[in-house]
């Protein structure tokens, strides 16, 4: 797949479905980036598109929100963290949320070998290798092996990367939207949500028809295309597998998707017509 292109598409609910309510704060545009998982190449494309679009928008305030899962799988997680730390878009605020993969990595670094084993079973060993940690036996899960790799990972992880991981937020509210990595516990007020659910929840949230007090924008649950439901918008399109990284663009009541990859649908909102598909 050629992933050297960006595409715009409309943000529509399923046929016959209701659109989720929600609007950004006044005079605010939001760019929400889904799970990256080590695909710095795709992240750079999305960032280029955001920079062009942000330069054309009239909104006074512009905010870029990363939904987490920078680590694991993909081509180079270390490069992703470098890029997120270094890249700034003129006039834009940056908000970085914590995904469950960052949660596992930090718990492992803090001595929770069980969290490390779970992480290794879901791409964590790739992240260690991206940081230059040699993994001789990828199947080893005994205490000695886990502790040895933990110490080597801690030594290899640059101090700015560790500080970044520890600084990640769990959620962010902007107007009628609530941004979080995984979702929320249905029936519980947003202010009462716990951190674990917001990084890890899946089926109870995905299958819920309840309104949550805001339209929840999330990643974590991979789907071949963005999921636009009456109470949530899911934007994890499996970048590390599909080559499609999704960014949800919100401005007032308007919504659109910016995506990488030739398989993404091509559709240019009028405001964005100046952005060539080959960006």
Image (spheres, rainbow, N blue to C red):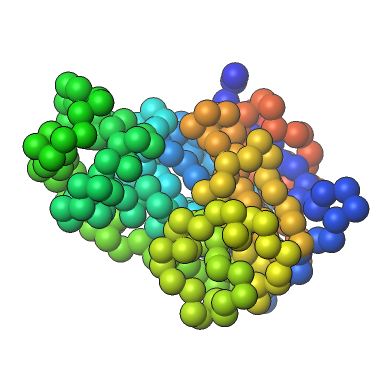
Instruction: Say if 246 sits above or below 60 in the image.
Output: above
What residue appears at the point 47 percent right and 63 percent down from the top-left corner?
A: 197
Left or right, 171 with respect to 229, comes to left
Q: What residue lies at 59% left-to-right and 54% top-to-bottom?
A: 203
For the image shown, how many numbered marks are present on the structure?
0
The residue positioned 49% from the left and 74% from the top of the image is 193
What x and y, as percent, mark residue 216? 62, 64
Q: In the visual, does 74 lie left or right of 187?
A: left
Query: Could you say where residue 84 lies in the image, as x and y percent from the top left?
Result: 38, 48
Pick the residue in front: 240 or 81: 240
Q: Quadrant of residue 252?
A: bottom right
Q: Please state the horizontal and vertical placement of residue 273, each as a whole percent of the image.
A: 76, 42
Q: Is residue 159 visible?
A: yes
Residue 19 placement, left or right of 131:
right
Q: Is residue 89 left or right of residue 22?
A: left
Camera-side residue: 49 or 229? Answer: 229
Residue 55, compared with residue 180, is above or below; it is above
- Residue positioned 85% across, 56% down in the render: 17
In the rendered image of this protein, does residue 217 appear above or below residue 4? below
Residue 108 percent coordinates (x, y): 22, 49
Quarter of the rendering containing residue 154:
top left
- Look at the image and tell me in which quarter the C terminus lies: top right
Nearer the observer, 186 or 62:
186
**Which image quarter: residue 148?**
top left
């Amino acid at each position: 797949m050629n992933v050297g292109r960006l595409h715009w598409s409309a943000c529509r609910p399923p046929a016959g479905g209701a659109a989720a309510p929600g609007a950004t704060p006044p005079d605010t545009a939001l760019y929400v980036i889904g799970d990256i998982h080590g695909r710095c190449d795709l992240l750079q494309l999305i960032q280029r598109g955001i920079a062009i679009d942000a330069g054309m928008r009239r909104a006074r305030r512009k905010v870029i929100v990363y939904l987490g899962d920078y680590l694991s799988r993909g081509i180079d997680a270390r490069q992703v963290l470098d890029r997120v730390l270094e890249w700034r878009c003129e006039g834009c605020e940056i908000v970085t949320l914590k995904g469950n993969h960052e949660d596992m990595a930090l718990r492992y670094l803090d001595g929770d070998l069980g969290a490390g084993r779970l992480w290794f079973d879901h791409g964590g060993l790739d992240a260690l290798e991206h940081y230059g940690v040699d993994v001789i036996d990828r199947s080893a899960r005994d205490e000695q092996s886990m502790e040895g790799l933990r110490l080597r990972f801690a030594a290899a992880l640059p101090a700015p990367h560790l500080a970044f991981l520890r600084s990640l937020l769990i959620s962010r509210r902007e107007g009628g939207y609530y941004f979080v990595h995984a979702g929320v516990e249905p029936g519980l007020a947003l202010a009462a949500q716990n951190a674990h659910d917001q990084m890890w929840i899946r089926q109870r949230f995905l299958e819920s028809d309840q309104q949550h007090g805001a339209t929840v924008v999330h990643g974590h649950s991979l789907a071949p295309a963005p999921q636009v439901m009456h109470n949530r918008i899911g934007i994890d399109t499996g970048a590390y597998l599909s080559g499609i990284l999704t960014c949800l663009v919100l401005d007032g009541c308007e919504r659109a998707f910016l995506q990488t990859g030739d398989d993404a649908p091509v559709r240019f909102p009028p405001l964005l017509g100046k952005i060539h598909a080959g960006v």
